[in-house]
Amino acid sequence: MWIQESIERSSKLKDHFKVNDVDVFIKDPLPDHVDAAFIFEYVSTRIPFFLLGNIEVIYVGVFPEMVERDINAFFEDGAIYVTNDQDDEMDMIEDIVHEISHAVEQRVGDLIYADGSLQREFTAKRKRLSNLMSKKYNVPSDFEFNIEYDKDIDNFLFKDVGYDALGQMVRNIFLSAYSVTSISEYWAIGFEEMFLGDPQKIKSMCPVLFNRLALSIKELKE
């Protein structure tokens, strides 16, 4: 099995690292200019250990799911899978932290979503953005209220509008163009900003999101 083979290979080639107590195995090599030790030490210092409770292992390499879904990373069954095709250290750090956010979301989803406040904040922002985009684009009819991932909405944002144009429109509404994609990505981008960026930016622009992040961190710390 490739997982066992990668573990054995990693032990021989020193491609085994740690993020706090989580094992990291590099199945396929990173580019020469990317410093793996720096990446995993950086993530360890930025992300509190108690947020990694349902992450058992991190694998780095080429995986069929990534090719099929055209993604850089994913979290599944207690494991984070992240591509080895990285531009630089921060590119990979962001991928890992993004997937940690989804692992946290899985643990405390009720706390994040149960009262509906985050959904209301997200849909209000989608409505503002829809009003802006409708002047130039044919916005999908369910854009304002369909908060889950939807391939048609994703394609509309990525292909029809384009992230460069979208990035200009979302200023002072969303934290980034990608956070528009779904409620789950809205959470994930907020998580990234909390630990890799400016928490005050979340607090001022997305106060409910900031509150849900703070409550989730407090819940998992206790």
Image: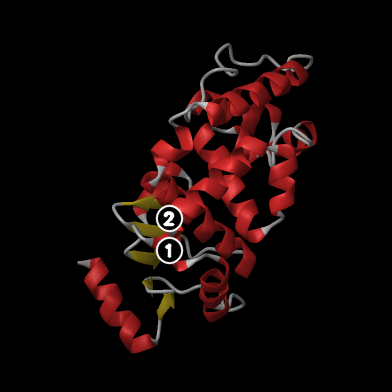
Give the x, y percent position of residue 74.
42, 51
Which part of the image, by quadrant, shows the N terminus?
bottom left
Q: Give x and y (percent) for residue 170.
A: 74, 33
Query: Is residue 1 found left or right of 169 in the rendered image?
Result: left
- Label 1, secondary structure: give it: helix
| Front one among 48 and 193 | 48
Q: Which mark is residue 50?
A: 1
Q: Nearer the viewer, residue 51 or 57?
A: 51
- Sort mark 2 into few (<14), some (14-19) or many (20+) by Cα contacts within 10 Å: some
Say if 121 sits above or below 111 in the image. Answer: above
What colour scheme has been applied to the protein in the rendered image? Answer: secondary structure
Q: Residue 116 location, x and y as percent?
A: 50, 26
Neighbor class of circle 1 (other Cα within 10 Å; few <14, some 14-19, many 20+) is some
Q: Can you see residue 72?
A: no
42 vs 69, nearest the viewer: 42
Place of residue 67 in the rendered image (x, y in percent of width and height, measured from the top left):
42, 49
Q: CA distance from mark 2 to mark 1?
A: 6 Å
- Whichever of callouts 2 and 1 sits on the residue coming sooner in the sequence is 1
Q: Is residue 166 left or right of residue 121?
A: right
Is 143 on the left-hand or right-hand side of 207?
Answer: left
Q: Is residue 29 above or below residue 150?
A: below
Q: Residue at coordinates 38% horizontally, 74% vertically from top-left?
A: 21
Residue at 62% across / 77% down in the picture?
Answer: 33
Front in this rendered view, residue 5 or 50:
50
* Residue that carries the numbered disc 2 in the rendered image: 220
Q: Amino acid at mark 1?
A: Phe
Amino acid type, callout 2: Leu
